[in-house]
Amino acid sequence: MSNGSPSTAQVWQQTVSLCKDRVNSRSFWEALEQAVAITIEDDTLIIGLRPEIFNLAGHLNVSEHRNAVEQAAGSILGRRVSLRIIEGDTMADWLNRKARDARVAAHREATYERRDQQMAEAQSWDSLYDYVARAYSGTPLRSLPQSRARYTTEMVYVIAEAMDQLYPERPDENTERLLARVIDRVATNVELPSTLVAMEIERLRAWKRQNAG
């Protein structure tokens, strides 16, 4: 707080007085009296309750009561303020809570990124799946064995090239299943064992690696 500005404790003391004037609720008053103002951070008033009485937080979280606290604190500070209630009543408790929040946020972000990556991969594999399906539909005289052989050869090259972009060095189970789905589609189209199609793809990729070296 700058010079002349009330401290967090003073803001809370005035907030409690205003709330008692505006809301007639004995349980709310008790929760206010037991709560400790820890700090004001990013326009958020952080208050805490000791673990053994944290159940009182329920009285503060009632919509009417929370609004009363935020409006009272906001009128004292001259700006909009939100309320955050934590378990514990010291700055150390708040710092620990923030550290836990940061870990949860990081985990959530990593989960979202992984999910987005899987969705993007699925869309790419889906495009490949659609391509091999359309290619077979557009194959002339596809009932003839030589036409199916040409189609299979072309798809082996197409899938092998696509794997250079879509198939990492250490693929996860999701990627393996997406690849298998494409291979199964080609194999079904030409009535070949999917293992045989997969073997031809692996043979071509091995040949490409050998020649690249």
Image (tube, rainbow, N blue to C red):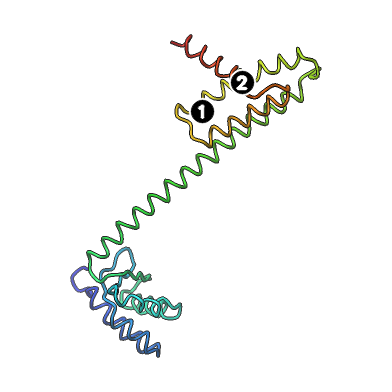
**Mark 1 residue element:** loop
SS type, badge 2? helix
**Which residue sits at x=59%, y=32%?**
125
Single out the residue that lies furthest toward the top.
Answer: 211
* 53 left or right, relative to 184: left
Q: Quadrant of the N terminus?
A: bottom left
In which image quadrant can residue 44 be found?
Answer: bottom left
The disc placed on residue 167 is: 1
In the figure, 21 relative to 169: above or below?
below
- The furthest residue to the left: 3
Q: Is residue 19 left or right of residue 124?
A: left
Tags 1 and 2 touching, CB below 8 Å: no
* Amino acid, disc 2: Val
The percent position of residue 17, horizontal first and vertical second, equals 30, 86
What residue is shown at x 62% (from left), y 23% (from top)?
195
Residue wearing tag 2: 158
Viewer-nearest residue: 34 or 18: 34
Please tell me the numbered disc located at residue 20.
Answer: none
Q: Quadrant of residue 87?
A: bottom left
Q: Position of residue 167 (x, y in %)?
A: 51, 28
Q: Residue at x 46, y 44 (%)?
A: 113
Please identify the quadrant where the C terminus is shown.
top left
Indicate the quadrant where residue 124 lies: top right
The kind of residue tagged 1 is Tyr
- Looking at the picture, tell me which residue is in the foreground, 40 or 109: 109
